[in-house]
Amino acid sequence: MTDKTVVMGFGNPVRSDDAVGVYVITQLKEKGIASEHITLLDMGTSAFEVLFQLKGHQRIIIIDAVIHSGEPIGTLFKVPANEIEGYIEDDPLVFLHSLKWSQALSYAKKILQEEYPKNIEVYLIAIEDTRLEIQMSLSVKEAADNLVNILQETLYENTLTP
């Protein structure tokens, strides 16, 4: 049986490069990636109600922006699996319209309990611009398009695995 994967894109679509996670989800939807084994979630600015949709998935892939990384804009990072647990808090303080990926995982762990997936991947794209703007910078968009291609390939391979 193929594991179910959920891809969660974080960001604010009216904050320039911060929209990168939402953009990746939109692109994956346009490519027809969603299936009975792959769920695409736009975490945007209303993420809490979406967290309950994680139930029944064995794999989580998170896409978000990272600001002040010290690397060039558009640099793609993949957080090592052994470091993800370090970001999870017992009781994170959040604002309803600004849930970070680490906070989402903290709440997902509480919601899902024993069904919380062990297979979690986090992709971050370096940004600098979060001004009120509906367009991303070219370098961030190129990095996001590259990530879409990477995810399309790995998600396709995952659905072929028995």
Image (tube, grey):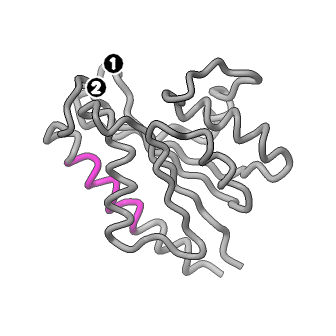
Magenta stretch contains residue 143: yes
Magenta stretch: dominant secondary structure: helix
Q: Give the quadrant of residue 93.
A: top right
Tell which of 59 and 15 is nearer to you: 15
State the mark number for residue 68.
1
Tell which of 91 and 80 is nearer to you: 91
| Residue depicted at x 46% and y 74% | 156
From the top left corner, tell me how far across and down residue 22 is, in percent.
38, 47
Q: Amino acid at mark 1?
A: His
In the image, residue 85 above or below residue 113:
above
Q: Is residue 132 left or right of residue 85?
A: left
| Residue depicted at x 51% and y 39% | 46
Mark 2: which secondary structure?
A: loop
Mark 1: which secondary structure?
A: loop
State the mark number for residue 71.
2
Q: Residue furthest right?
A: 114
Which quarter of the rendered picture does the C terminus lie within? bottom right
From the top left corner, tell me how far across and down residue 66 is, in percent.
38, 28
